[in-house]
Image (spheres, grey):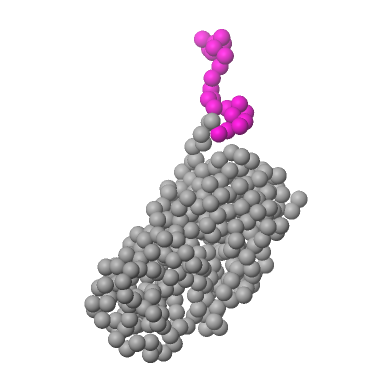
Amino acid sequence: MIRALKLHRIAPGASVQDRGRVGYRAFGVSTGGAADPLALAEGAALLAQSTDCAALELPGSGGVFEATAALRIALTGAPMRVALDGVPLVWNASHAMPAGARLEIGGATSGSYGYLHVGGGFDLPQQLGSRSAHLAAGIGAVVQAGDTLPIAEDRGQAVGFCLPLDNRFDGGILRLIQSFQTDLFEAATRERFTDTPFSRDARANRMGMRLDSEGEGFATSVGLNILSESILPGDIQITGDGTPYLLLWESQTTGGYPRIATVIPADLPRAVQTPAGGVLRFRFVTRDEALEAERKRRDHLRALPKLRTPLVRDPSQIRDLLRYQLISGVTAGDSQDEEE
């Protein structure tokens, strides 16, 4: 039987994502890939498989899915309500999904992007070295109800692991480094920027997010007369009306709006996972502090497989509890050791 996942219902904007495309910025194609790369790595750790495996990215809510064969699954990113054949499952954990079972994933309880991983990864054709849908570049497309997603061979077996819950799903402080145009903003403007609480606009997408605030906007001393330059995820552009836009993984590769600062890579998962209306604040750090944060980020990614622990299931939620040998080494009580 073909290993696949049937999509009976799916959230608008859901897509298959992996680590994205590297080496195509000169041709106008940004990296793309999972909006939250940390969630992608967490799923790989829970299933003990490569971080190259593609997962299903769920913006805001999930859907209803059916397995055509026995699968291993993992759930990471923004916590969502989830049940397998009506039995609630733990988020940020790996589980067995029998053939014919129906998985129901509801809305996010915090955060913005949840991820459904399968053992072996989704086996879509690669385009420019990636299985990711790059919606802004017109590569691939969102998935829809009625689709059947093929799954590659799964060489693993273990399930029933979980990872510690992270706190990146409710906004917070994002660390900044200076960009090429930071000095074009007056010191008072930069200070006001870091003193201002921003809320994530509801119209955010995989390209970027608008940052709303009260009071006047943020302008440079030279207006908008900036030559178009290369753009990277994390750059914060200031548009003509003084509104900041935080650019993400599917952003354009060049742009002419001045950039007041750049969010460091270690903090982009927190930015991406901030829900609509969530509050974000900013703080400048030095280059050395940014490099230290990057070192810690990479160390954390390497350590993820060691951080997983066995998932302790709630006996009240185990339908076939009597099939399990809960205590080993117990006799009927009326036998004696032959040596006695």
**Relative to 189, residue 205 above or below:** above
**294 in the magenta segment:** no
Of 279 and 174, the residue lying toward us: 279
Point out the residue furthest to the right here. Answer: 1
Residue 22 location in percent, x, y? 53, 74
Of 11 and 134, the residue lying toward us: 11
How many marks are shown on the rendered structure?
A: 0
Q: Is residue 34 visible?
A: yes
Residue 180 location in percent, x, y? 35, 82
At 59% from the left and 67% from the top, the residue drawn is 132
At 50% from the left and 78% from the top, the residue drawn is 252
**326 in the magenta segment:** yes
**Relative to 150, residue 175 above or below:** below
Which contiguous range is marked in magenta?
Answer: 317-340
Residue 68 location in percent, x, y? 71, 49
Chief secondary structure of the magenta portion: loop
Residue 165 location in percent, x, y? 43, 49
